Image: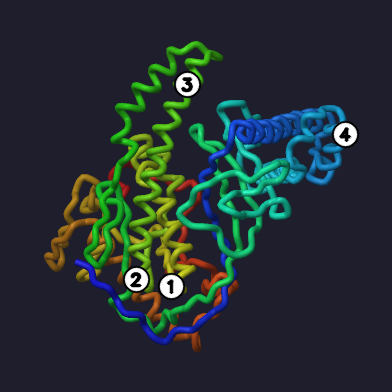
Amino acid sequence: MSSVLNWDKPRTLALALIQKAYRLKLYPTVEQADAFARFAGSCRWLWNYLLDLQHKKYEAEKKFIFRAEMQELLPGLKREYPWMAEAPSNSLQRVCRNLDQALKKCFKEGAGFPRFKKRGVSREAFYVVNQGLRIENNRVVLPKMKQGVKFRSGRLPEGRILSATVSQRAGTWWCVVQCEVEQNVDVIDASSVSADAVIGVDVGLKSLMVCSDGVVVANPRRLSKAQKRLRRAQRILARRKKGSANRRRQAARVAVIHTKVADYRADALHQATTALVRRANIVVTEDLNIKGMVKNKRLARSISDAGWGEALRQISYKAEWAGKHHIKVGRFEPSTQKCSACGNSRSGEDRLRLHERTYRCGSCGNVADRDFNAALNLRNYGLDYVGQAMPERTGVIPVNACGASSAGPDAIAFGRYGALNQEPASTSDVG
């Protein structure tokens, strides 16, 4: 059972600069679509050329070519390959920047080494900056295009346009416009939030989200439902001759199935997270190590299909935009094993296993659904955090340009973190 909650006091008005992305579905003419394909192809070719150059440079001198040096090569490449001049210059410069960042992430953050991009497999896309980008008369005007491109969107971009990425997905061209929007955000003082406005959320596989206020969000399981059609389409694709037109058409059919699954999942997550942030002033979730969990081969596809990471990301930024608070509880807090009524924790042989869907406390006799019990525990952690940490601060919580707390967009309760490579030892350890 849920109810609409009134706003808590006190509140303060903060001017925030928020970056928002607007996705526009493009309807290019045949000539415009051909131009898009050439622009994206030039960017893909440049990426592969520079990456090959990086390999040769490292083998010879044990060094890499960085962004400024790569950009200096562009004029000479345009003279040698005149067709490269057709693409917007900032799109090619962006390729140099992206490759430079990929190399730095590889050596500084442990990411994988950049890979070559294959035509028809990698995403066809190119980047444009705001100088040659504008929206007028229901058309998107892009650089190197003689006329604007028709588009359709549920919302028109607002604020100052920063950049855009034009990409093709399942045969459809999209333009994602990045804008900077200036708006007033009512920031809620977390120390004065009523207990009813604090909601704990436990994400799972049986149900996508179970909230402490009794709201249960069903797991769409869209990928599982599409498996029969997907397997059949992929079997047909495997029989097609490589390089043939039939194989390209069948690959497009497979891509359409994947696109519909992704769109349905995104829509369900947006509806669930928006409704949650509207109900609550403080949302408490667990700081899950999803990368470690998907290493479990038995649960990897189900976890990815549920979209836990995207759900938590949406809760984070939507709470930030609304001037509300998102608290992440340390991943080793026993939210599933702890009784929400008396605080007793089950451990050892008495530990609650994955197949046990009901929590029974041996101390107080409390009986509750395991996910609802975990959501109540998360709510209790949030109440403890607000009651203990927030009174030490005076006035309204300081905000940054995005309206988040001074500690960042998400508050971390209890400050306990697990190793980055944590993974469940067995299926019984996943709550």
Q: Which residue is mark 2?
A: 280
Query: Does the residue at mark 3 contact the one at mark 4 (Cβ under 8 Å)?
Result: no
Horizontal relation, residue 307 to residue 73: left or right: left
**Label 3 to label 4: alpha-carbon separation:** 37 Å
Q: Point out residue 373 in the picture as x, y percentages from the top left corner.
A: 23, 62
In whole angstroms, how far apart are the C-alphas of marks 3 and 2? 47 Å
| Left or right of 377, for residue 325 | right
CB atoms at circles 1 and 2 under 8 Å apart?
yes
Q: Earlier in the sequence, mark 3 or mark 2?
A: 3
- Dot 1, how many residues are within 10 Å of its Cα: few (below 14), some (14-19), or many (20+)? many
Q: Secondary structure at mark 3?
A: helix
Q: Which image quadrant: the N terminus? A: bottom left
* Colouring of the image: rainbow
**Residue indicated by mark 1:** 324
Q: Nearer the viewer, mark 3 or mark 4?
A: 3
Residue type at the position of mark 3? Arg
Q: Residue at x 77, y 43 (%)?
A: 89
Looking at the picture, does residue 219 appear above or below residue 224?
Answer: below
The answer, for residue 411, to whether it is visible in the render is: no
Q: Is residue 80 left or right of residue 24?
A: right
